[in-house]
């Protein structure tokens, strides 16, 4: 790609210095990944400033640089000064890879809870309808049936455009993707024209990043300025507000409120959910094999998105009945024991309440919960999580999640502030020992919930990423317990 093509396409250029006739062979925003002929985009991050690494990028062969500050460079290096480097990275990446998002039909799902499951249910329905699909989200990147790892819920715009270009090469037609509030605020998805934007709900989370709840809401709302149509949960207060503020076509869904797509005759038991979906003057029985009221909402979100895309209700119902679940989302760990072990990603007060209230509806014995809270993240939700878990659990163990740079004991202190009086619990910072303890305590009919990490197969302690999978750890101790009996 010639640099002059880039200059003609970028918005909010403040100044250009140097020749625009250079060839751009690759793009990088990490100076360590710069090659000869690279365009280096200097981003001012939260810990490091990419402008401090421009000299290093040039020394490694960068022929063009985008930045927000005034810098002195050799005459043979093109420098494009812009208002916002992150936005420029999104635009440049899209152009470099041939604007791949424009050749795909992309469904974006945003909200505090339910994003991952909803994207996978959308994929399952579209697969059933005969389309080739991809998924981008917390679990990773799925191109048809191939799963690739991903560092973020929503990758940076450079990686995202590369993913989309790979999907196109493999014949993908539809992409369902999680769209985090971080990605919206940091311009990672500015280059995407979403076919449908889906709003699941909004509860407290990420207030370490957003200055307040209003900023969190505003970031989520941005998805719909990038979307042709919207699907919105109007049982959620923020969803109702969103409906009032949008000027694009909206399809609403709900269990309680009046909506375009509504669940009636809802039945929830330990084997799953069933309900009648009433949509577009039609009614169809829906069965989905994951229990919980949240499963009804996730199903409704996926049903509504696929209805907008033109999939018929019969196909939708057939697809949902075949889905067994999503990794790390209310996922059972069964080694033949006489009690139940469930691993779930729930890491917010609302997420924990959804999962624990579901367990309470079918548990024959005690509810034993193992949970913690992530370090370097929203501290305000920690006591709220403690309150919810103490309200629903007969016994619980507060442990580490991903403590990152924080002291696990300090995180536990924050959680403990919300714990109800007379609660039966213990502190155990070692997550492996906490899971072991819960399994030792369990007896026939009990339900153990191991919450917070779900599908993750690592634990972040200080600057180390260590192998750790709740499911495998639980399986190890379940086998040992069975051998002892």
Image (spheres, rainbow, N blue to C red):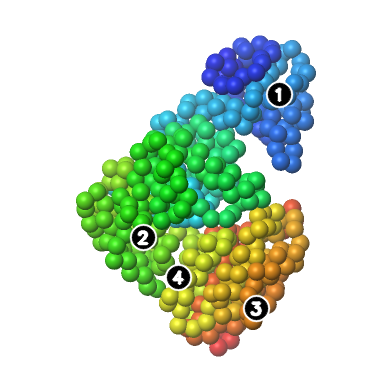
Labels 3 & 2 near each other (Cβ < 8 A): no
Expressed as whole percent of the image width and height from the top left, the position of residue 226 reads 46, 35
Q: Nearer the viewer, mark 2 or mark 1?
A: 2
Residue occupied by mark 1:
61
If you read the primary sequence from the N terminus, does the residue marked by circle 4 or circle 1 appear first?
A: 1
Expressed as whole percent of the image width and height from the top left, the position of residue 303 reads 33, 52
Query: Measured along the vertical axis of the image, is residue 293 above or below residue 154?
Result: below
Quadrant in which the N terminus appears: top right
Q: Total label count?
A: 4
Q: Nearer the viewer, mark 4 or mark 3?
A: 3
* Mark number, residue 421: 3
Residue 23 in view here:
no
Query: Which residue is at 75% across, 21% downward?
Result: 70
Query: Which residue is at 52% across, 62% downward?
Result: 351
Q: Nearer the viewer, mark 3 or mark 1?
A: 3
Residue pushed farthest bottom? 485
If you read the primary sequence from the N terminus, does the residue marked by circle 4 or circle 2 appear first?
A: 2
Query: Measured along the vertical axis of the image, is residue 430 above or below residue 244?
Result: below
Residue occupied by mark 4:
358
If you read the primary sequence from the N terminus, does the residue marked by circle 3 or circle 1 appear first?
A: 1
Labels 2 & 1 near each other (Cβ < 8 A): no
Quadrant housing residue 242: top left
Quadrant housing residue 143: top left
Residue occupied by mark 2:
256
Looking at this view, is 241 or 319 the one in front? 241
Give the class, few, some or many, for how many residues have Cα within 10 Å of label 2's Cα (few <14, many ≥20).
Answer: few
For label 3, the SS is: loop
Labels 4 & 3 near each other (Cβ < 8 A): no
For label 2, the SS is: loop
Give the alpha-carbon distance from disc 3 to disc 2, as whole Å: 33 Å
Looking at this view, is 35 or 205 the one in front? 205
If you read the primary sequence from the N terminus, does the residue marked by circle 2 or circle 1 appear first?
A: 1
């Amino acid at each position: 790609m010639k640099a002059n093509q880039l200059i003609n396409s970028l918005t909010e250029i403040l100044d250009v210095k140097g020749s625009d006739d250079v060839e751009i062979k690759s793009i990088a925003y990490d100076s360590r990944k710069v090659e000869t002929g690279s365009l280096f985009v200097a981003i001012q991050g939260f810990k490091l400033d990419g402008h401090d690494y421009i000299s290093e990028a040039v020394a490694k062969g960068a022929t063009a640089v985008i930045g927000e500050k005034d810098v002195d460079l050799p005459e043979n290096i093109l420098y494009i000064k812009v208002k916002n480097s992150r936005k420029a990275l999104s635009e440049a990446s899209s152009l470099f890879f041939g604007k791949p998002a424009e050749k795909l039909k992309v469904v974006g799902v945003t909200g505090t809870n339910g994003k991952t499951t909803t994207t996978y249910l959308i994929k399952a329905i579209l697969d059933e309808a005969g389309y080739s699909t991809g998924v981008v989200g917390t679990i990773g990147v799925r191109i048809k049936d191939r799963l690739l790892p991903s560092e973020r819920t929503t990758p940076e715009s450079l990686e995202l455009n590369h993913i989309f270009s790979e999907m196109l090469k493999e014949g993908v037609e539809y992409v369902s993707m999680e769209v985090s509030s971080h990605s919206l605020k940091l311009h990672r998805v500015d280059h995407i024209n979403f076919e449908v934007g889906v709003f699941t709900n909004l509860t407290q989370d990420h207030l370490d990043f957003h200055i307040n709840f209003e900023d969190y809401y505003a970031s989520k709302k941005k998805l719909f300025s990038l979307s042709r149509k919207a699907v919105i949960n109007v049982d959620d207060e923020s969803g109702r507000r969103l409906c009032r503020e949008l000027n694009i076509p909206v399809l609403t869904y709900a269990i309680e409120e009046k909506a375009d797509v509504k669940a009636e005759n809802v039945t929830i038991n330990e084997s799953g959910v069933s309900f009648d979906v009433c949509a577009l003057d039609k009614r169809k029985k829906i069965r989905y094999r994951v229990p919980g009221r949240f499963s009804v909402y996730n199903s409704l979100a996926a049903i509504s998105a696929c209805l907008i895309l033109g999939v018929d209700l019969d196909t939708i119902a057939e697809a949902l009945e075949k889905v067994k679940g999503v990794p790390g989302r209310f996922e059972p760990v069964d080694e033949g024991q006489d009690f139940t072990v469930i691993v779930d990603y729930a890491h917010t007060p609302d997420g924990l309440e959804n999962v624990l209230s579901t367990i309470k509806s079918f548990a024959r014995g005690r509810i034993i919960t193992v949970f913690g809270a992530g370090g370097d993240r929203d501290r305000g939700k920690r006591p709220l999580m403690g309150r919810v878990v103490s309200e629903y659990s007969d016994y619980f163990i507060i442990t580490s999640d991903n403590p990152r740079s924080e002291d696990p004991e300090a995180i536990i202190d924050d959680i403990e502030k919300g714990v109800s009086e007379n609660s039966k619990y213990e502190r155990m910072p070692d997550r492996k020992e906490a899971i072991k303890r819960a399994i030792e305590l369990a007896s026939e009919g009990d339900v153990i919930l191991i919450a917070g990490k779900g599908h993750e197969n690592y634990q972040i302690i200080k600057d180390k990423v260590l192998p750790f999978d709740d499911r495998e750890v639980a399986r190890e101790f379940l086998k040992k317990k069975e051998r002892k009996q």
